[in-house]
Amino acid sequence: MIEAIQTRKGKHLMKIADIDLDKPGPQSIAIVTIDIENLRHHITGLEPYSKALLIFRYRQAIVGQAYCPVYHGTISIQDINARIGNVSWPAWCELMRSKVNRPLPTATIAVCTRDRTDDLAKCLESLIPLAEQGHEVLIVDNCPSDRSTFELVGCYPQVRYINEPKPGLNNARNRALREADGEVVVFTDDDAFVEPGWVSALLENFEDPMVAIVTGITLPAELNTKAQRWFEETNGFGRGFVREVFDTNTIWPLASGKVGAGVNMAIRRSAVEEIGLFDAALDGGTATKSGGDQEYFYRALSRGFRIVYDPRAIVWHKHRRDWESLRNTIYGYGVGVFAWWTSALINEGETTLYWRAPKWFLQYHVRNLIRALFRRPQHHPLDLAWAEFRGALIGPVSYFKARKALGVTHPNERDQLQFDRGVHKKLLDFDDSLEVST
Amino acid sequence: VTQPLTLSVVIPTHNRVELLSQSLTALRHQSWPADDFEVIVVADACEDETASFVQEYRAEAPFELKLIEHNARNPSATRNKGVSEARGNYILFLDDDVTPSPELVKAHLDAGGPNTVVLGYSKPVFHHKCDWWQQGARLWWEDAFRQMGQAGHRFTYRDFFSGNVSMPAELFHTVGGFDLSISGRLEDYELGIRLLEAGVKFKFKPEALGFHHEHTNLDIWLRRLRMEARANIQIGYQHPALRHNLFSDFQAENIPFEGITARVQNLSFHHKKLYVWLYKGLLNLTHLSEKLRWRGPYWYTTRVLREMAYWGGVAECFDSEAAFLGYLQESPIQTDFEEKRLMVDLASTSSKEALEKIFRETDEREITVAFDGLELMSFYPEFGTENIEARHLFRELRERAQREFFPSPAFQHFLISLEEYQ
């Protein structure tokens, strides 16, 4: 692994050394999970670190986080106490959450992957306990270049392997939606791993029949490199520590980035008939690079469904380690937002985007770029701001490019696939039985 | 001549033969034995082939199928007519656009009993892409049923929907059936009031699931609001204590701006031409907003239209604003709450059983619940609402705790113990 030195302008001047990134360096941030009910002693043994990210946990939920200095590998209990104050409201909410007495729906866990067996192995390890609880686990191998994923998954008989030859993350997600047996399909990424209570925490929220999607909290698995720290600071998956319910009354659907991300989401399959499938022209593996999950959240909201964010459903995500990948990711986010907004404009007729999208471009991308240029306080690194700016500019074009590459006029297969919705299915069954009997 | 059956299903219908055939088909597939209930279709002023369809269907139906035709154009009369021919011990009212699930009849009969009304779950179903109004309506219906399903829900007459509800036939006759003077809208609410005032227990059964095929849209809804205003006034004549409820259909939660009700009232009583002009303009603007998917303007215009339709309906019922104000002033006002007040302090009585006992045995009009001297909430006897019970308090407290922090550890402990109660 190589960490490149950044110059002021963010260009690589030289590569100083090969650093083993699995080992933390002096700039690394330790990640410490603290159960606030059992907080008695100083935390020790954090030797190489000078800083730590404290993640506060209470009962089943994550209730807060704070950065904290580490002296001689130790965090004192006073330092922790000084930072624990702001968890009181989330902890109260967690304490007062009502139990769900109804039986939970069945779930299928799906992981879409492509040539990343190192990370996938860790992800699979965390999914095995869930498979043993009786949940179906699918690994959708998206257009693999070799057999390594197939061989890795072969080691786990509890896990189903599916090869999806059509490239594109959204194609893989659609495949998972079609192949799944469960009433709910729960997605995570191959570079993430999950907590044991993850699935049941997501499923509890489907008690409300109007909830189509549930998202959870995603925390950084490591913050060893500068790239990882920057990603967590600027584009982390943090969405707060209190359960929230979103629908068109509480959120503008085109701001669906606020509700969560594809790394930690569950989708009710019966709602897919109304929402449609994922747009194959969006997200990883296509010219648009990202935005598939956001566009799907948007469509769910705009069809009148609810989305719940629940900090009880916990996933740990390993951010990209090297700066090059970080820049590509940020560039991809810039492309993705404007690509999926383009899709919302042309497929769904969201005409407010004619002025909202340019406004956002000025308020966020242009502003960030100017702040980085003039080194205003807390500016982003210039190369990241520039990458996101370029991405945003190319976004709309990339959506048309991706569609052209797919060779479709209509962007996805929403209409080709009939999902059974309770009523119709049942009524059809009645009619069949009638014909047989008469 | 007739021997009693367990259940009579009464289906009032008006020109909806296709949906009716779905309902009848679904009734053939009930888990309850088909020879133990009858189905009475009451066709009100049907101009389609409803009558001939039912006549033909009768031959193949495993249950007894009766057809009554009349020409009243009045849902209250139609339902009463159906009951008058019924020989079941229980009556199940099913609308023609509600398709029952196989467990529906059984769920109603399992939960039913003397002095009990069983409310079923009519899940709204749309057969095409929902427009924005329909999305809102679907949320509204689903939320209403979810509320009813929660332990400690205090039922009101607003929970009584006649599309999927059952009760003992005797009870229906005792309270006097549907009121014929209220027709078209809210006649079910009015019956709900009389049932609750007679001390009947409401029960919600989610297993009594029917699929409600919805065809309402914004324009139909606005027309209905006008009729609802008229029905509300009629209900006010029947039950003067409810006259103030003219206002409570739209309580402050969703009003677009302060004082809108007063302004719209003024408009609909005094500036009828301006009212009509504004109403049409706003309706067009609403449709345009939806077409262009402008959510903000849509939200405002629909809220204003809702007020306008409703108060326009009210204005149609009175010659002048003075007459309307006179109508409101006839409403009796309760003034003796303060004197007859029971204070319950949770710091001294926090066992659930003790609270249940207090709530059961008190005959005070108002119960105020406090913790260590801090007043938390008050419960009043409300007309057309279930009597207060301790479980209502428990639910209110749990709900309050979702929004508010209570620092006392003893009270927290009590709140947590309520979770197990639920």
Image: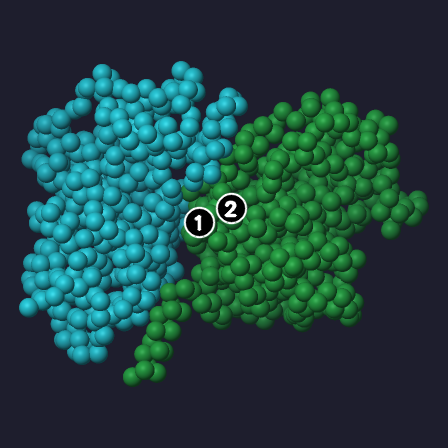
Amino acid type, callout 1: Asp
Q: Position of residue B2 (x, y in %)?
A: 9, 67
State whether residue A407 appears in this view.
yes
The residue labelled by disc 1 is: A208
In this view of the protein, which residue sits in the foreground, B182 or B119? B119
What hue represents chain A? green
Q: Earlier in the sequence, mark 1 or mark 2?
A: 1
Reply above or below: B163 against A100. Answer: below
- Is A14 on the left-hand or right-hand side of A70? right
Chain identifier, cyan in the render: B
For image coordinates 49% across by 70% down, the residue present is A417
Amino acid type, callout 2: Val
Q: Chain of mark 1?
A: A
The residue labelled by disc 2 is: A308
For image coordinates 24% across by 23% down, the residue present is B364
Nearer to us: label 1 or label 2 = 1
Q: Secondary structure at mark 1?
A: loop
Q: Position of residue B269 (x, y in %)?
A: 14, 34
In this view of the protein, which residue sits in the foreground, B120 or B342? B342
In this view of the protein, which residue sits in the foreground, B40 or A324? B40
Label count reads 2
Q: Position of residue A88 (x, y in %)?
A: 58, 28
